[in-house]
Image (tube, rainbow, N blue to C red):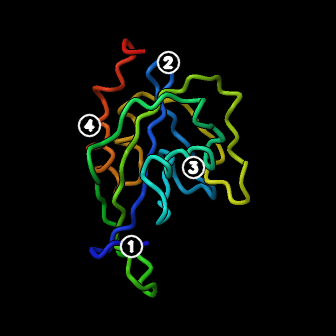
Amino acid sequence: MIDPDGYRPNVAIVLINRHGKVFWAERCNNDGWQFPQGGMRTDETPEEAMYRELEEETGLKRHHVELLGSTPGWLRYRLPRRFQRRDSKPLCIGQKQVWFLLRMVTDESQFILDGTETPEFTSYRWVDFWYPVDNVISFKRRVYHRALKLLEPLADPTRA
């Protein structure tokens, strides 16, 4: 599903632990590190898509996390031309995302990174809140910065 402007609706997940560190995962095929994210189906709300993607990519279910909040509306990023599939119609020029902040309320034994036929991630680690902004693939850095800036007030560990 691509919107009329060429953006694919998507959700992104910032998962925070009780120490204020965020889940940072290595993509399969040594394709870099990122937060969990994925496309929305036409019959899903952003929140429904987020819980589905959370389970598909990490193995965590709704009862393993607490929803702390989300970004207001869509945040967009453009794909560099080399990543655009020029032969697909309609052309997808980027993604529009609703970002969610979740607090993990279970232990790490609940992670299942290989629970689907095509796993997204091979490994993960916990990093400082702002670490991903400088360490995600370059074309996603601005959207990561905007999302984390909007979600940071909700990440206060004293709110737990």
Dot 4 falls on a residue whose secondary structure is helix
- Binning the other alpha carbons within 10 Å of mark 2 as few (below 14), some (14 to 19) or many (20 upward) gives some
Q: Which residue sits at x=40%, y=40%? A: 100
Amino acid at circle 3: Arg
Q: Position of residue 132 (x, y in %)?
A: 40, 40
Q: Which residue is mark 4?
A: 150
Drawn side of residue 96 relative to residue 117, left or right: left
Q: What residue is pinned by disc 2?
A: 18
Marks 3 and 4 sit apart, C-alpha to C-alpha, by 23 Å
Residue hosting label 1: 2
Q: Nearer the viewer, mark 2 or mark 3?
A: 3
Side of 58 where 87 appears, left or right: left
Residue 39: where, in percent of width, then height? 48, 60
Q: Position of residue 10 (x, y in %)?
A: 42, 58
Local packing at callout 4 (Cα closer than 10 Å; few below 14, some 14-19, many 20+) is: some
Amino acid at dot 2: Arg
Q: CA distance from mark 1 to mark 4?
A: 25 Å
- Of pointers 1 and 3, the one earlier in the residue sequence: 1
Closer to the N terminus: mark 2 or mark 4? 2
Disc 3 is placed on an element classified as helix
- Which mark's residue is nearer the viewer, 3 or 4? 3
Q: Quadrant of the C terminus?
A: top left
Element class at badge 2: loop
Residue at 51% of width from left, 34% of height from top?
23
Residue 128 vs 50, above or below: the answer is above
Q: Could you say which quadrant of the image residue 157 lies in?
A: top left
The answer to which of marks 2 and 1 sits earlier in the sequence is 1
Mark pair 1, 3: CA separation: 19 Å
Q: Is residue 75 above or below residue 54?
A: below
Seen at 52% across and 52% down, the residue is 32
Label whose residue precedes the other's in the sequence (2 or 3) = 2
